[in-house]
Image (spheres, helix red, strand yellow):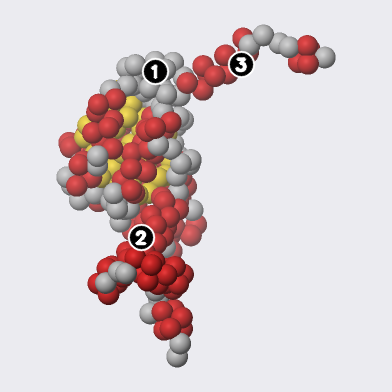
Amino acid sequence: MNLDSALKQLRLSALAQTLSVRLQEATANRLSHGEFLELILLDEINVREQRKFARRTLAAEFKALKNLDDFDWRFNPSIPRKDIYELAACHFIRKATDVLFVGPPGVGKTHLAQAIGYEAIKQGFTVRYRSIFDLVSDFLSEEALAKRDRLLRGYLKPDLLIIDDMGLKQLPKHAGEYLLEVIMRRYETRSTIMTSNRPLEDWGKLLQDVPTAGAILDRFLHHTQVIAITGKSYRLKNATAAMKAPKTEKDTA
């Protein structure tokens, strides 16, 4: 068995790719055996970490990959930037507490929730993003009846679950029961971020079940940091700017 085959059998593919270059480097710089070994092992570790990060990012199922660097903080000064960066440090995940973003559509709730989720992945946490409609659809599907335990594990296992778009429209009957089970099972064991376009007092109407909505809020709000965001829609701002832009001769041709 040659060296390449041995490395592949040991699943040291990254080491196999850089070994030739590292041997040249070791010879040129007269590295000790220990220094050389450290170099090639670090190559393998770095590649494995990159692969883990890529797998965790893909498994999160983000609507779009967002980060805090490309968020337009100037558009909405009401957003507490210090609190957002504190959440991005992910201490709340280590404490198994929760976060609720409340505000009208377009003010940045989804962007911030996903950006915090992305930061969590960078720190080694597992994350899953689902809209409330995805969650309800998952549990209402015909396949869910046969795979309920497996489906539920998909919502209970992640260190951070992001449930987006609560309040966009009224949800189907029994939706509150599914959400309640997820919230109750994650309570004080895993962290959840939710975003809501409607005030909390409207949740009973949205879920078509006032008692269940009350039970959800009772558990969820117990250890939750609420971030209330006001202001106009960022998406409408861009659309309005485009409409007001002066037309060129090419546009009017």
> Mark 3 vs mark 1: which is more N-terminal?
1
The residue identified by callout 3 is: 242
Q: Is residue 115 above or below residue 20?
A: above
Q: Where is residue 106 drawn, in percent x and y?
A: 45, 24
Residue mark closest to the camera, 3 vs 2: 2
Quarter of the figure with residue 152: bottom left
Q: Position of residue 118 (x, y in %)?
A: 37, 43
Q: Quadrant of residue 47?
A: bottom left
Q: Quadrant of residue 103?
A: top left
The location of residue 108, given as percent across then percent down, is 41, 27
Query: Residue at point 42% right, 44% down?
Result: 130
Residue of label 2: 46
Question: For mark 1, what is the residue?
Answer: 74
Q: Residue at x 32, y 69 (%)?
A: 30
The amino acid on which the numbered mark 3 sits, given as a three-letter code, is Ala
Q: Residue type at mark 1?
A: Arg
Q: Residue furthest right?
A: 253
